[in-house]
């Protein structure tokens, strides 16, 4: 009997071994190919590698050209025969699994949304799903798994995954298992550094899902979805979520969750935004599917202006999703009570949406930034939007009572700023209008005030088209006031098209009826240009005295024209034309007449001109001094300095020239030399106050001139007659001649010299000029003889008057005239008045 039992057991063992060896072959050949054909993929392969009473190993491969491909090279299922009969598997090991994902245009290729059918609620019934499964698994382990992500033009990214899923069941009759608890732990590295833990637990009447996760920074796999200009710096995000799920459809009943950030920094150019500090909660939300409460905190802009942003509100995800809330913006740079606060509303329906955003500060706000203080009075902003049946309308209204800006050398005050805008977008066409109004702009340091500024600009745009329809608006400034005087008004038009935008305006003034300045600005959206053109117009001191402080002892008039250009490349340039310009000093009996120049400024803002600018003057009068046909070549170096390259002027029938000379508002003293050529002898003496002088002959020489705050001085100047050329001079002011001659021992000798100068034929002459205090000493040296014999003779060796005599004795005469400098240099009595008058 024992031998038969032994033989039976051996046969049974042989059959079992034969089945174990042949079963994988039969399954792989007969069953699995049919099962693989049912999988919706380009290619699918299911292979059982080995099978035993306690373990099954297999591999699965699913590949698609577009959709994600899956490779499971090693699946290990552990079980016992008794647990298997009860529908239970001890564990499942998934090792070296790989999933390949292709991303194009921010979407995963081959993934489409799931469709909910009539039985969607039953399909989500977790309890029915689990009870319908033939087996239950105690744990699933993921080991050394990888996700391969391919994106156009970028290097492949790999995410390494490891994890463990465990389940606790409640045993029921007939070996049906009911889920009590499900726990999942996952960790990722490589392209994604992530730690996560989740637990699903069966509670009375619902499932409880709890999740916690930690993500380091913005992982490379997500970074491509962020615009390339935004740089993400190191940081960490911690998330948590708690849900009560309906057992029937797994729909959430209660929700509680949030996100915490640890020093996550986003940066673009000069803008930096910090999300959370030291684990501060960034977002918290709680509620039910019908109403979710949320709170946003921890948003902080670091630069250019440090700001803190917080918001809270409700979301009602019903048939019309409604989002409402309030927000607040604060900054450590803002003083006073104040934060900027507001509210927002957004309601979305099937046929469109409506939105509302408001902002205000109820109390004055002061911001201090980089030495500049900006003060706001209460402000209001309202933005509305409505989209329905493909038509979007939006409007903006903003009102600010007062805006003040103050820095070290600058102050501005703006009153009552009103802004309105309306736009409509329909069928790809945008239309709208912007209206801006400002009651007043005050610049107290400059004495400038701008009143009643209005801007009206239409908007018109067709996205996708190269051509931009033409549009035209208007700009108007009612009054430009300088030093409490109505200086000018401006009105013009604004226009734009696909070729560019522009401004054309005219500036007028009530002070001068024929004045008109044309202002134009052009832009082709890449290059910009501004131009100012003032047509030739008259001006005078009486008109301008209402604007600028003009000394009482100066009057002027003339004609002026100007042009200026400013572009996006290169310095601003300008030109100024003066003609028929006269300057009078009535009290001093002096003036400058017939001024004409064309000044070309190569750099307007640096006040630097081109070289060799020409200034001409028809005549200059200073007391008895008369100059004419002056030509001055100059250039402007800076707002405080003019460089005189060369000066030439007609004087007393001859020419006077000077070399280069630098004039600056900062200099205390100035020296130059006047080089004189063929000055008429008699005319020169008359202009220096020796009246009644007539005659012929010319003089040459130089006159060194020294300017200082004490006065204007001639320093050892001299003029002399042309060698080899004689002349005749008649001095008719005999009293002045006598006072200038030295005392002689004989009265007859003095009388002979005076009578000789009435009609004197000189062989050579020399004049010297020397300033002493407020006197100018003009020394005259003459050598010659009377032009005709004089009634003098000699008696006993002495010169005596003799009516019968006919003496024509040679003479060398020295005459000194002391002249008051004030009567000569009337345009400027010292360097300061010279600079002021010229």
Image (cartoon, grey):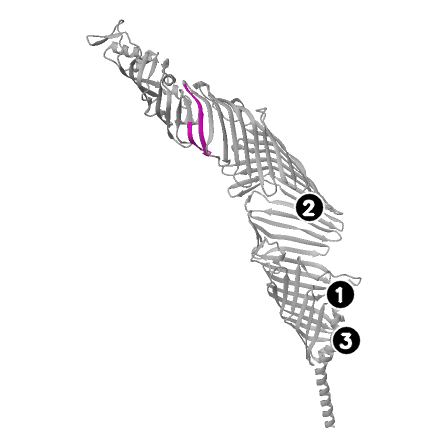
What number is the disc on residue 465? 2
Residue 478 at least partly seen: no
Above-or-below relation of 243 to 372: below
The image quadrant that residue 732 belongs to is top left
What number is the disc on residue 125? 1
The image quadrant that residue 276 belongs to is bottom right
User: Residue 41: x percent and y percent?
Assistant: 72, 67
User: Residue 129: x percent and y percent?
Assistant: 75, 68
Of the image marks 3 and 1, the number of the one nearer the N terminus: 1
Residue 597 on the magenta segment: no
Of the image marks 3 and 2, the number of the one nearer the N terminus: 3
Task: Identify which residue, 194 or 168, lies in the foreground.
Answer: 194
Q: What secondary structure characterizes most of the magenta part?
A: strand
**Who's the residue at 51% across and 27% down the image?**
578
Q: Name the image quarter holding the C terminus.
A: top left
Of the image marks 1 and 2, the number of the one nearer the N terminus: 1
């Amino acid at each position: 009997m024992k031998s038969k039992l032994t033989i039976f057991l051996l046969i049974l063992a042989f059959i079992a071994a034969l089945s174990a060896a042949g079963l994988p072959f039969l399954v792989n050949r007969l069953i699995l190919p049919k099962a693989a054909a049912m999988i919706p993929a380009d290619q699918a392969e299911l292979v059982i590698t080995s099978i035993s009473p306690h373990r099954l190993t297999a591999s699965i491969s699913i590949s698609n050209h577009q959709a994600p491909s899956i490779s499971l090279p090693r699946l290990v299922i552990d079980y016992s025969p008794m647990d298997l009969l009860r529908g239970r598997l001890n564990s499942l090991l998934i090792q070296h699994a790989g999933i390949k994902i292709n991303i194009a245009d921010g979407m995963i290729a081959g993934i489409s949304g799931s469709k909910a059918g009539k039985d969607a609620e039953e399909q989500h019934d977790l309890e029915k799903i689990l009870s319908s499964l033939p087996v239950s698994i105690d744990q699933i382990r993921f080991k050394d798994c990888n996700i391969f992500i391919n994106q156009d033009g970028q290097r492949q990214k790999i995410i390494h995954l490891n994890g463990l899923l465990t389940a606790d069941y409640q045993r029921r009759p007939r070996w049906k298992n009911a889920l009590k608890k499900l726990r999942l732990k996952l960790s990722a590295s490589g392209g994604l550094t992530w730690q996560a833990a989740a637990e699903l637990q069966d509670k009375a009447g619902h499932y409880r899902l709890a999740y916690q996760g930690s993500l380091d920074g913005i992982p490379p796999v997500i970074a491509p979805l962020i615009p390339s200009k935004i740089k993400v710096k190191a940081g960490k995000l911690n998330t948590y979520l708690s849900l009560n799920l309906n057992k029937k459809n797994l729909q959430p009943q209660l929700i509680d969750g949030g996100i915490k950030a640890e020093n996550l920094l986003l940066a673009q150019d000069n803008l930096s935004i910090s999300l959370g500090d030291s684990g501060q909660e960034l977002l918290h939300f709680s509620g039910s599917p019908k109403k979710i409460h949320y709170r946003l905190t921890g948003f902080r802009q670091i630069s250019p202006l440090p700001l803190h942003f917080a918001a809270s509100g409700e979301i009602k995800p019903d048939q019309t999703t409604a989002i409402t809330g309030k927000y607040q913006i604060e900054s450590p740079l803002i003083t006073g009570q104040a934060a900027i606060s507001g509210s927002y509303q957004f309601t979305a329906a099937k046929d469109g949406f409506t939105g509302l955003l408001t902002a205000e500060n109820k109390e004055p706000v002061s911001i201090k930034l980089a030495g500049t203080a900006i003060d706001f009075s209460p402000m209001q902003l309202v933005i509305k939007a409505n989209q329905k049946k493909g038509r979007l309308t939006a409007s903006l209204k903003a009102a600010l009572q007062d805006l003040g800006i103050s820095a070290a050398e600058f102050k501005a005050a703006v009153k009552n700023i009103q802004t309105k805008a309306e736009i409509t977008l329909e069928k790809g066409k945008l239309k709208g209008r912007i209206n801006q109004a400002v009651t007043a702009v005050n610049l107290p340091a400059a004495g400038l005030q701008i009143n009643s500024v209005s801007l009206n600009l239409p908007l018109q745009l067709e996205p996708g088209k190269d051509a931009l329809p033409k549009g035209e608006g208007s700009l108007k400034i009612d009054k430009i006031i300088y030093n409490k005087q109505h200086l000018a008004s401006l009105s013009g038009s604004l226009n734009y098209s696909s070729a560019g935008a522009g401004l054309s305006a005219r500036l007028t003034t009530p002070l001068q009826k024929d004045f008109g300045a044309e202002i134009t600005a052009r832009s082709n959206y890449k290059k910009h240009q501004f131009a100012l053109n003032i047509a030739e117009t008259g001006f005078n001191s009486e008109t301008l005295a209402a604007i600028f402080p003009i000394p009482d002892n100066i009057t002027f008039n003339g004609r002026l024209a100007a042009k200026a250009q400013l572009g996006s490349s290169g310095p601003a340039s300008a030109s100024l034309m003066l003609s028929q310009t006269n300057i009078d000093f009535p009290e001093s009996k002096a003036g400058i007449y017939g001024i004409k120049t064309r000044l070309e400024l190569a750099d307007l803002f640096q006040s630097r001109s081109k070289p060799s600018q020409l200034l001409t003057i028809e005549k200059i009068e200073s007391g008895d001094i008369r100059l004419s046909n002056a030509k001055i070549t100059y250039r402007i170096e800076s707002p405080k300095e003019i460089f005189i390259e060369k000066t030439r002027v007609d004087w007393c029938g001859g020419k006077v020239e000077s070399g280069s000379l630098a004039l600056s508002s900062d200099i205390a003293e100035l020296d130059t030399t006047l080089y004189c050529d063929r000055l008429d002898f008699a005319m020169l003496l008359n202009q220096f106050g020796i009246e009644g002088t007539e005659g012929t002959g010319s003089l040459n020489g130089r006159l060194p001139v020294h300017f200082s705050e004490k006065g204007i001085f001639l320093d050892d100047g001299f003029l002399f007659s042309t060698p080899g050329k004689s002349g005749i001079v008649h001095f008719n002011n005999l009293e002045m001649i006598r006072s200038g001659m030295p005392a002689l021992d004989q009265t007859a000798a003095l009388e002979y010299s005076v009578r000789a100068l009435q009609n004197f034929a000189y062989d050579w002459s020399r004049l010297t000029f020397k300033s002493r205090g407020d006197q100018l000493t003009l020394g005259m040296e003459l050598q010659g003889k009377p032009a005709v014999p004089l009634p003098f003779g000699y008696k006993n060796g002495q010169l005596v008057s003799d009516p019968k005599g006919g003496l024509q004795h040679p003479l060398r005469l020295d005459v000194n005239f002391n002249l008051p400098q004030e009567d000569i240099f009337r345009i400027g009595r010292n360097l300061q008045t010279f600079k002021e008058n010229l």
